C-alpha cells in the first residue's frame, strides 16, 4: 500500500469515529431534552391541592354581636401547576368578611372563587361551605333581680321567714333577644335541708345563656328560719270548773278549741286544763258562763265551741274527798 493510500484510510476511519461519537452525543441530548420536557410538563400539568383557609369576620359595628356560631374556616380546592400549588399558604389566603354595614337580623354571604388570591395559573374549583349565615343582634344592658333557687326543705315545724340577697340585683349585658325577656337571674340551689336557724352563704349566679355577661358572678345570701306558725284543733277537751265551793254539773262537758302557735310547740301541747269556767263566788243555782281558755305564751286562741256553758251549782259543798261529777 502506498503512503497516500494509508493516509486516506486513516482520515476516513477517524471521520467515522467522530461521526459515531457525535451521534451518541446527539442521542444523549435528545434524551435529556425529552426528560426535561416531561419534567416541566409534569410540573405544569393540572394538579389539585386541598386547603383549609381561615375566615376573618371584620369591622362588626359597635354594639352588635354575632349570635350564632358561623364557621371559622372554609375548605377550598385549587388546581394548577404542582410547583405553584406547593407555595400556597392557607393563612395568607384568609377569607375576610366585611361586616361594617351589617344590620341586626339574618344575613347571607356567598363565597366566590375570586375572593381567594391564589395567584396566576391557579384556580379555585371547589368551596365548602360556599355560603355563610350570620345572625346579628344588638347588645343591651339591664338591671335584673336575683332569685334564690333552693333545694330540699327546712326542718319539720320550721319555715323560711325571709331571705336577704346582697346585691339584690345584677347588671346583665348581652344580645337583646336574651336580655329583654329576663324577669330575674337564678342562683345555684341553696340547700335548706334540716335548717332550724338563720344561715348565710355565698352562692354563684347561673346565667340563662352563656353569651350573657354579669356585673358579678355571685351573691351573699342570708336565709332567716323561724318556727312555723300553724293552727291545731283540739277536740273533746274537758271543761273544768275552777274555784267552786259547791258540787256542780257543767253542760256541755267538752269543748272544741283551735289554737294558733309555733308548730313544734303545738305538737307537744296537752289539751288538759285548756278549757274552764270560773265559779269563784257563785251561789248555788244555774249559771250561764263564758268558756275560758288558757294558752301558753306565744300562742293564741283562734276559736272555741261552745262560747258559753251552763253550770249548775248544788247546795252541797265540796270536800277534799269529793270527785267532780262526770
Image (spheres, rainbow, N blue to C red):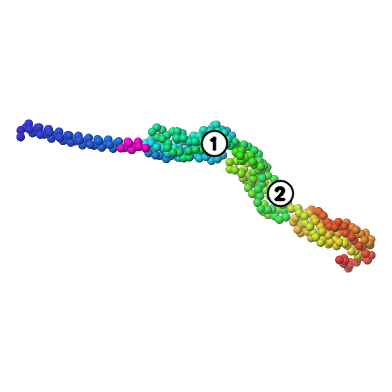
**Residue 120 location, x and y as percent?**
39, 32
**Residue 49 location, x and y as percent?**
40, 39
Which of the two discs, 1 and 2, sits closer to the camera? 1
Residue to which mark 2 is pinned = 224
Q: Residue furthest bottom?
A: 321
Taking depth in this image into account, of 35 and 218 the one nearest to the observer is 35
**Residue 192 location, x and y as percent?**
67, 52
In the rendered image, residue 40 lying in the magenta stretch gets the answer: yes
Q: Residues within 10 Å of mark 2 (few under 14, many from 20)?
A: some
Can residue 182 be seen here? yes
The disc label shown at residue 278, or none:
none
In this rendering, the answer to whether 78 lies above or below 238 is above
State the SS at label 1.
strand
Q: CA distance from mark 1 to mark 2?
A: 52 Å
Boundaries of the magenta span:
38-46
| The image quarter in which residue 36 lies | top left
Quadrant placement of the C terminus: bottom right
In this rendering, the answer to whether 175 lies above or below 280 is above
* Magenta stretch, main secondary structure class: helix
Residue to which mark 1 is pinned = 107
Q: Is residue 289 left or right of residue 44?
A: right
Which callout, 1 or 2, points at the residue further toward the start of the chain?
1
Taking depth in this image into account, of 57 and 166 the one nearest to the observer is 57
Taking depth in this image into account, of 238 and 215 the one nearest to the observer is 238
Quadrant placement of the N terminus: top left
In this rendering, the answer to whether 317 lies above or below 259 is below
Residue at position x 88%, y 62% in the image: 250
In the rendered image, residue 238 lying in the magenta stretch gets the answer: no
Residue at position x 66%, y 45% in the image: 147
State the SS at label 2.
strand
CB within 8 Å, label 1 to label 2: no
Amino acid at each position: 500500500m502506498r503512503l497516500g493510500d494509508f493516509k486516506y484510510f486513516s482520515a476516513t476511519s477517524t471521520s467515522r469515529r467522530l461521526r459515531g461519537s457525535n451521534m451518541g452525543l446527539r442521542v444523549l441530548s435528545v434524551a435529556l431534552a425529552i426528560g426535561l420536557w416531561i419534567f416541566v410538563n409534569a410540573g405544569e400539568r393540572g394538579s389539585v391541592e386541598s386547603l383549609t383557609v381561615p375566615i376573618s369576620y371584620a369591622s362588626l359595628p359597635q354594639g352588635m354581636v354575632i349570635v350564632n356560631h358561623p364557621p371559622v374556616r372554609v375548605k377550598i380546592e385549587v388546581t394548577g401547576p404542582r410547583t405553584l400549588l406547593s407555595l400556597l399558604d392557607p393563612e395568607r389566603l384568609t377569607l375576610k368578611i366585611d361586616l361594617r354595614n351589617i344590620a341586626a337580623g339574618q344575613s347571607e354571604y356567598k363565597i366566590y372563587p375570586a375572593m381567594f388570591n391564589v395567584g396566576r395559573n391557579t384556580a379555585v374549583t371547589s368551596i365548602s361551605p360556599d355560603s355563610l349565615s350570620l345572625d346579628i343582634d344588638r347588645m343591651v344592658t339591664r338591671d335584673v333581680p336575683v332569685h334564690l333557687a333552693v333545694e330540699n326543705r327546712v326542718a319539720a315545724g320550721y319555715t323560711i321567714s325571709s331571705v336577704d340577697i346582697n346585691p339584690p340585683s345584677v347588671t346583665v349585658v348581652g344580645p337583646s333577644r336574651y336580655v329583654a325577656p329576663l324577669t330575674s337571674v337564678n342562683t345555684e340551689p341553696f340547700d335548706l335541708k334540716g335548717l332550724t336557724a338563720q344561715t348565710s352563704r355565698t352562692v354563684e349566679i347561673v346565667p340563662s345563656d352563656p353569651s350573657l355577661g354579669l356585673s358579678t358572678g355571685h351573691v351573699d345570701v342570708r336565709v332567716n328560719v323561724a318556727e312555723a306558725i300553724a293552727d291545731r284543733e283540739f277536740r273533746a277537751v274537758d271543761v273544768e270548773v275552777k274555784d267552786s265551793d259547791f258540787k256542780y254539773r257543767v253542760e256541755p262537758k267538752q269543748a272544741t278549741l283551735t289554737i294558733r302557735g309555733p308548730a313544734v310547740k303545738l305538737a307537744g301541747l296537752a289539751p288538759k286544763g285548756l278549757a274552764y269556767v270560773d265559779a269563784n263566788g257563785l251561789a248555788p243555782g244555774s249559771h250561764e258562763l263564758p268558756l275560758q281558755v288558757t294558752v301558753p305564751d306565744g300562742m293564741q286562741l283562734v276559736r272555741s265551741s261552745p262560747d258559753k256553758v251552763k253550770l249548775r251549782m248544788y247546795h252541797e259543798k265540796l270536800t277534799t274527798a269529793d270527785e267532780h261529777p262526770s
